Image: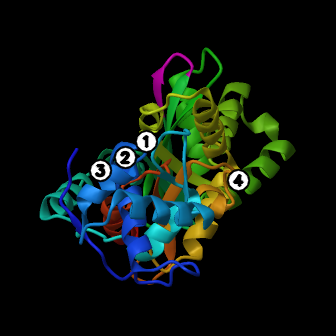
Amino acid sequence: MMRPQSPLFRPSIPMPHGLGDREAAILREIVEEYVETGEPIGSQTLAQRLQPSLSPATIRNVMAELARAGLLFSPHVSAGRLPTEKGVRLFVDGLLQFSSLTEEDRASIDSRLDIHGRSYQDILSEASSLLSGLSSAAGLVLAPKSDATLKHIEFVALGPGRVLVILVGSDGQVENRIIETPPGVPPSALVEAGNYLNSRLGDLTLGNLRERVRTEMDASRHELDALTASVIESGLATWDADGGTLFVKGQGKLLADITEIERLTTIRMLFDHLETQETMLQLLQLADASEGVRIYIGRESGMFGMSGVSMIVAPARNEAQKIVGAIGVIGPTRLNYGRIVPVVDYTARMVGRLLG
């Protein structure tokens, strides 16, 4: 695929010792080709794109310098060059030209995150889906546990052994979870469980309520029949007082370009990591340390301990600048950073405003 000729230009950060504008222009072309196609690029193709033009022999010498600097490598003996993670990092920090969020993208995000008539969880799930759709990678949205007190709890039967638990916070946020219950739970047990918990809400957070109810039930279990007690315990156990809610959408997109078994193993390991409580806490720590959008390449985040994976994450802050969540995208190193960064930034600001 032919692209317009690229002018030589001066990078916005210092290049490694001995590398200048010409090297920067060639590195940028190689990384941009990698992001677009995933394929290596050779000196002949680069000679056609660079302006002013350079001979293929000169370009090969420059590519050799970039390889010695640890910025490029050759996947095959006779192939062109691909960027290393160090090369992608240099590109992101000083050579990348970020695009502006289009009005179409902005309108799409605004409409899909419209809060009217939607629950807290619906908004977070939708944010994760739209990030995946706009980035062609996996979208991550994490909301930490709420410190708000509870206003109402309700249990609604969905079918044999399945009950919907509805929690309404004093801040207006609504969370819904589905729990499994023992067979034969009558509607009266659900009503009794709801009444029991609602009578004890006061000004308690979910964690405080869990602690109080467990203490009371241990002391006077005879006041509740076994089925009602099981509903209460299952409902309270659904929420982890020390964790949060993590939505991951678009995992299948991470498998789209996999041709090697090693990459498949890496992605499977990534899926396992994303399901752990530790990952949620690390995501929040990364967001807390960021003023805005941060890009982590390979092992830089300290979360996954694997190469070939990049993550773009931003904090979602409310009007008081308190972090109410983390918004991000995770995918292969060849993410389209220039397009995704403004999408993550705008989505994080929207979610922060909606949840604030």
**In this view, 208 is above or below 246:** below
Q: Name the residue under label 2.
A: 132
Q: How is the image coloured?
A: rainbow
**Furthest residue to the right?**
219
Q: Residue at 40% across / 47% down in the picture?
A: 125
Q: Mark 4 points at which residue?
A: 278
First-in-chain label (1 vs 3): 3
Circle 3 is placed at which residue position? Answer: 134
Residue 301 image point, x, y percent: 63, 62
Residue 225 or residue 7, whichever sits in front: 7
**Amino acid on which the number 3 mark rests in the picture:** Leu
Label 3's element?
Answer: helix
Question: Is the C-beta separation of discs 4 and 2 under 8 Å?
Answer: no
Earlier in the chain: of badge 1 and badge 4, it is: 1
Categorize mark 4 by other alpha carbons within 10 Å: few (<14), some (14-19), many (20+): few
What amino acid type is highlighted by mark number 1? Lys
Element on which disc 2 rests: helix
101 to the left or right of 284: left
Tag 2: amino acid: Ser
Q: Give the range drawn in magenta.
A: 156-161
Dot 4 or dot 2, earlier in sequence: 2
The residue that disc 1 covers is 249
Tag 2–tag 3 contact (CB < 8 Å): yes
